[in-house]
Image (tube, helix red, strand yellow):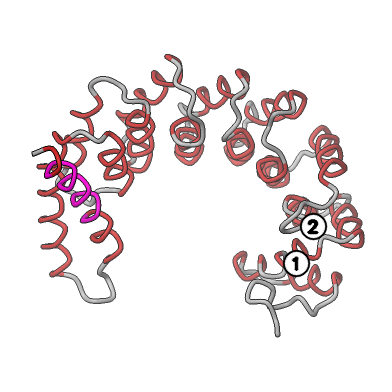
Amino acid sequence: MKSRHQPFSHLSTKTLIRRNLSEPDDEKAWRYVIPLHFRGTQEVFDSAIQLTKSKKVLERELGVNILSQLGIPERAFPIKTIHYLLGLMKKEKSPTVLSAVGVAFGHLTDSDDHRVVREIVFLANHNSSQVRFGAVYALSGCKQPLAIKTLIKLSADVSKEVRDWATFGLGSQIDLNTPAIRRALRSRLNEKDDEIRGEALLGLAKRRVPGIISNIIKELQRRKPIVYLVVEAAEEIGNPKVLPALRDLYSRALKRQKKRSPEERNSYWIDKLYQVIASYESVSSKKR
């Protein structure tokens, strides 16, 4: 019986690589990488290394992507891979490949290695937003001062995607509560992008920053679709002052649902919002 996660596990390593490289659809192409991750053998490792030495960007990127999660559930050749990718970073010129290297470090390490962090900071200063995204991915969850400083800088990046992931990294991926982190998150409350504002709100709610309740209520009252991050922030803050705004949002959401076709309805969102309201009401009734 074939694994649900490895529908092509019967194919050889060479065939999986060849099919990946010939598949124009990125999502479909990735299906041929997953069996290689699970396989995690010396043959796959060597094949990935050879790919990273190719003159073709697509092949070098694939090699890095294979190495990034080689060995599931237990990593195969992690130390060798880290050392190899550190060396590759210094000579690689393609933003696509460098971004893949950054993402690979996010999978391979918890960024506690000072040398790895220093090299990733090099990626964070790259002129390509694609590469800087790779740096954010690598540093998220790291509590080293240099990593935090870099994430704070990237949370104000010109790229929306980089800002979004850096804000997520600072707000939810770590529990440090420093003045610098709080300032960085507060700076994102003026973002036009709903997701970034939501990440910042959630991070500030987790840290119980004074005055954040009014920001949460303001977001809940916006007359436009609300990202669930704001509801998470309301749940996290645990203050009954947000309950009226949650109830009003729920009422508006139900009205919008009725106007939509069954295919367009988001019952998960409605259910989660209801659960948050119910948890608040449960606490209120117990205090009576």
Residue 21, numbered label: 1
- Against 203, is 24 above or below? below
| Cα distance in 3D space between marks 1 and 2 | 7 Å
In this rendered view, identify the residue nearer to me: 127 or 222. Answer: 222
Q: Are marks 1 and 2 in contact (CB under 8 Å)?
A: yes
In the rendered image, residue 145, in percent from the top left (x then y), is placed at: 60, 18
Q: In the rendered structure, which segment of residues is drawn in magenta?
A: 274-285
Q: Which three-letter amino acid code belongs to the residue tagged 1?
A: Leu
Work out which residue is located at the far top of the displayed protein and give it. 179
In the rendered image, residue 180, in percent from the top left (x then y), is placed at: 45, 16
Residue for badge 2: 59
Magenta-colored segment: predominant secondary structure: helix
- Quadrant the N terminus occupies: bottom right
User: Circle 2 — which element?
Assistant: helix
Q: Check if residue 204 falls in the magenta segment.
A: no
In the rendered image, residue 171, in percent from the top left (x then y), is placed at: 44, 32
Q: Earlier in the sequence, mark 1 or mark 2?
A: 1
User: Circle 1 — which element?
Assistant: helix
Q: Please report the residue visible at 12 percent of the width from the left and 49 percent of the height from the top.
A: 247
Q: Which three-letter amino acid code belongs to the residue tagged 2?
A: Glu
Left or right of residue 93: residue 12: right
Q: Check if residue 276 falls in the magenta segment.
A: yes
Q: Quadrant of residue 148?
A: top right
